[in-house]
Image (tube, rainbow, N blue to C red):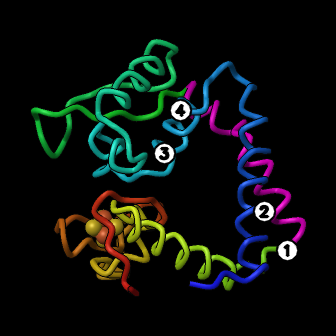
Amino acid sequence: MAISPEALEAAHLIDRLERLARAGEQVGGLNPAQWEALRYLARANRFSRTPAALADYFVSTRGTVSRTLASLEEKGYVVRSASRRDGRSVEFSLSRAGEQMVKHDPLVAIAEHIEAATGGALADVLDRLRATLRRAIAHNGGRAFGACYTCRHFRAHTRPRSAIPHHCGLLDEPLSESDSRAICVEQEPATA
Ligand code: SF4
């Protein structure tokens, strides 16, 4: 496929932004893998916080992910518990200290620059970035891990008067407004 100079420049810009975000990760004494795991746990829904799901997301091995989670547990940033869906497995969530740490995530500084540069007019950019990510995932193999509200199993406002108004058609589970924004290991894009 012929690649336009603009497509190549966009790839370089994404790479540069990623490096700038990485440079800020020295704050807090966490390595890049630990930051990624904290970020993931801050965004993932309750069905997606097992070592297996993290390994799928990072295209890594469960052993590597388990070591990262164990080190975060030792530092007091994550908490381990039995999985609610599979009693033989464990799941992780952010501790109070972990929640505080992600507030200082260097990626937030990048988001602030994006907000300042675009005024928040990002719907088109987001659509195109999602489409790019879908293609990259299809090429490399792996799961989409998109936001719940973009999933083909998401049923909006099935209980309009409830505090948990939405529903997952796949897992037959109620979903809150914040669940609808979380990422999910089972997510399947509504639009291919
Ligand atoms: S609707 Fe999709 S993304 Fe949301 S919880 Fe169900 S499977 Fe996961």
Q: In 3D space, how far apart are the residues under numbered discs 1 and 3 (Cα atoms)? A: 25 Å
Q: Position of residue 10 (x, y in %)?
A: 75, 71
In this picture, which residue range is highlighted in magenta? 97-117
Label 1, label 4: how far apart the Cα atoms are? 29 Å
Q: Residues within 10 Å of mark 3 (few under 14, many from 20)?
A: many
Q: Residues within 10 Å of mark 1 (few under 14, many from 20)?
A: few
Q: Amino acid at mark 3?
A: Tyr
Q: Nearer the viewer, mark 1 or mark 4?
A: 4
106 falls in the magenta region: yes
Instruction: Indicate which disc residue 118 carries.
Output: 1
For label 2, the residue is: 13
- Looking at the image, which residue is at 70% across and 66% down? 11
Circles 1 and 3: CB atoms closer than 8 Å: no
**Which residue is labeled 3 in the image?**
40
Left or right relative to 8: residue 158: left
Tell which circle, 2 or 3, labels the residue nearer the N-terminal end: 2
- Badge 1 amino acid: Thr
Q: Residue 19: name its quadrant.
A: top right
- Which structural element holds mark 3? helix
Q: Residue at the spot x=29%, y=34% of the render?
A: 62
Query: Which residue is tagged 4?
Result: 33
Q: Position of residue 16 (x, y in %)?
A: 78, 53
Mark 2 surroundings within 10 Å by alpha-carbon count, few (fewer than 14), some (14 through 19), many (20 or more): few
Quadrant in which the N terminus appears:
bottom right
Side (left or right) of 101 relative to 185: right
Which of discs 2 and 4 lies nearer the camera? The answer is 2
